[in-house]
Amino acid sequence: MMAAAVKIAGSDQFNLTGTCSRVDSPLPAPSPANCAWGKAMTKAPLETLRIGFIGSGFIARFHLQAMTAVRNCQVTGIYSTTPSKREATAALANDLSLGPCRAYDSIEHMLCSGVIDAVWILSTNDTRLEAMREIHRLVTREGVALAGVACEKPLGRTLPEAREMLELVQGAGLYHGYLENQLFAGATRRGKEIVWRRAVPLTGRPYLARATEEHSGPHEPWFWQGERQGGGVLLDMMCHSVEVARFLLTGPDETRDSLRLKSANATVATLKWGRAGYAEKLRQSTDGAVDFAQRPVEDFARGILVYEDLQGDEVIVEVTTSWAYVGPGLRISLELLGPEYTMSFDSLATGLKVFLSRNVAGASGEDLVEKQNAEQGLMPVLEDEVGTYGYAEENRHMVEAFRKGETPMETFDDGVAVIAALMALYLSAESSRTVDVASEDLSGFVPAVARQG
């Protein structure tokens, strides 16, 4: 099997050489022999895309579960800063028959191993730009060849970070994919297809998309820390809602940037976790890493984004996200409204439900639905979470695009557009006004909750 090539305009076949720098490590030192750049390569599709993960947390495990439903790929490397976590994640990949997979102690060792064709950036928000800088260095200076890079949401914590991510991946000549799972959910894609095929031609395009995502709070302490995460629930979850709404409002034959963002209006609040009792509960559950009494971030956000379509008509995106929702578990709801039609979806309106009486007292967990809040009563059950949320199809799409040398339908360009919208919403909430996007320079804007020092 031949390694994937860095795309070079006007060249169908090429033979380049390069070297990988040595670093001190107990692993075998990288060498030119195991740097893919030095091999003869063509644009012929790879039989198998070999993937390296940067990151070994909750979302990495979710992606591993999703990849069990994806053909033509292997997960062959895991890097993260915590040895025990990267070893455990590599072991899980092998247990799921996705390998052979091993843990690496640096990005350089993983990319120079000779067994990586593409990278999934799944690490914490505050490390993604540094990871992309290292990928860029290894490709452009050390001769490592990759087919592409996929990055989890959000692409950056600020607009400059997101733009640099895009510039780096373009500068390295790599295909790039933005991992926004809700666009790939079966309900999202099927609902959009029906509306745009049956209703739009007869009555006109949709004019309002609503998207909501709510749960009781994130898994890891860093999500609650404004400096590391880049904000609160608005950045963490509204990135999903903005993009899935934008996707639903965009015609199947239109590019995503055919909708031009005009204005943003938002409200944010700390409704639950700033209260004394809950702030203390959060402090204790994170071993003191999170102190909402002193350094809170928003746990509720609501926004209105006004876009203009190619015909000059306004369309509206209405989004709400919360870490203060207490219900069976994570709830995602979508609506698409047009002149004579409505599409709707609720992730907790499941066909499968179980009832457990008060005599069934078990340990707490998330075996029925993500962010599960109870173990008794009438409970919805998501029998295929990675499928329902879109992770399986998302990974299938990215694998096939990189394997065949094609541009994914969701790229870093879309990630930049999402961050631009989110920064406009933060500015609106902080200034208590509607932001006219065309007249604002958001390049230097950092949300107040991320500026805490």
Image (spheres, helix red, strand yellow):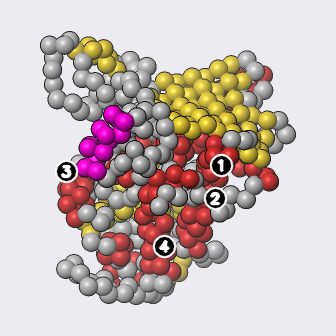
| Mark 2 in CB contact with mark 4 (< 8 angstroms) | no
Residue at 42% x, 64% y: name it: 127
Q: Is residue 23 left or right of residue 212?
A: left
Which residue was labeled with disc 4?
A: 133
- Mark 2 or mark 4: which is in front? 2
| Mark 1 in CB contact with mark 2 (< 8 angstroms) | yes
Kind of residue at badge 3: Asp
Q: Which mark is residue 95?
A: 3
Kind of residue at badge 2: Phe
- Mark 3 or mark 1: which is in front? 1
Of marks 3 and 1, which one's residue comes earlier in the chain? Answer: 3
- Mark 2 or mark 3: which is in front? 2
Which residue was labeled with disc 1?
A: 427
Kind of residue at badge 4: Arg
Residue at 35% x, 24% y: name it: 328
Find the residue positioned furthest to the right.
312
Residue at 53% x, 43% y: name it: 234
User: Magenta span covers which residues?
Assistant: 276-288
The quadrant in which residue 138 appears is bottom left
Which residue was labeled with disc 2?
A: 445
Q: CA distance from mark 3 to mark 1?
A: 46 Å
